Amino acid sequence: MYGRLTGRRRPFLNKAPEEGLKVSALCGGRNGLYLEGSICGIPCLMLVDTGANVTLVRTDLAQKLKGNFIYTAPNISLKTATGEKAEIHGKLDAAN
């Protein structure tokens, strides 16, 4: 199933982004379903997690987006799939 999505580009996804988040392609494989897109103009692959309540951003990408981050004191605690605590540094307003 996932193999059919690999590398396919959807014409309606190639439109210029309005602002913030842009999706340009779907990629699938054994490790999950990914969207090829950008956040505030920075290209990245995004794992689709329909059960997630929050979206996590890698540290290296967060550093590139530093000007768009709003520091907030964490009011929730996150754990990884292995049970380790995930550090929260702030939130991102991708619409600006």
Image: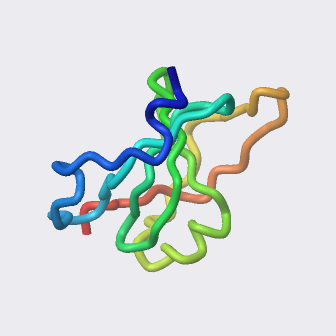
In the rendered image, the quadrant that contains the C terminus is bottom left
Q: Quadrant of residue 50?
A: top left
Please tell me whether residue 59 is drawn above or below residue 26 in the rendered image: below
Measuring 61% from the left and 58% from the top, which residue is drawn there? 89
Q: Nearer the viewer, residue 28 or 87?
A: 28
Instruction: Determine whether, in the image, residue 28 is placed left or right of residue 85.
Output: left
Q: Point out residue 15 in the picture as x, y percentages from the top left corner.
A: 16, 61
Q: Point out residue 19 in the picture as x, y percentages from the top left corner.
A: 21, 65
Display colour scheme: rainbow
Q: Point out residue 54 in the picture as x, y percentages from the top left corner.
A: 48, 37
Instruction: Determine whether, in the image, residue 82 is placed left or right of residue 53.
Output: right
Measuring 47% from the left and 56% from the top, which residue is drawn there? 91
Please tell me whether residue 82 is drawn above or below residue 70 in the rendered image: above
Name the outermost residue toward the front.
Answer: 4
Q: Nearer the viewer, residue 90 or 49?
A: 49
Measuring 53% from the left and 35% from the top, which residue is drawn there? 28
Q: Quadrant of residue 58?
A: bottom right
Please tell me whether residue 16 is drawn above or below residue 31 in the rendered image: below
Measuring 44% from the left and 35% from the top, which residue is drawn there? 5
Q: How many marks?
A: 0
Instruction: Determine whether, in the image, residue 17 is placed left or right of residue 24.
Output: left
Q: Point out residue 68 in the picture as x, y percentages from the top left corner.
A: 40, 72
Q: Nearer the viewer, residue 41 or 91?
A: 41
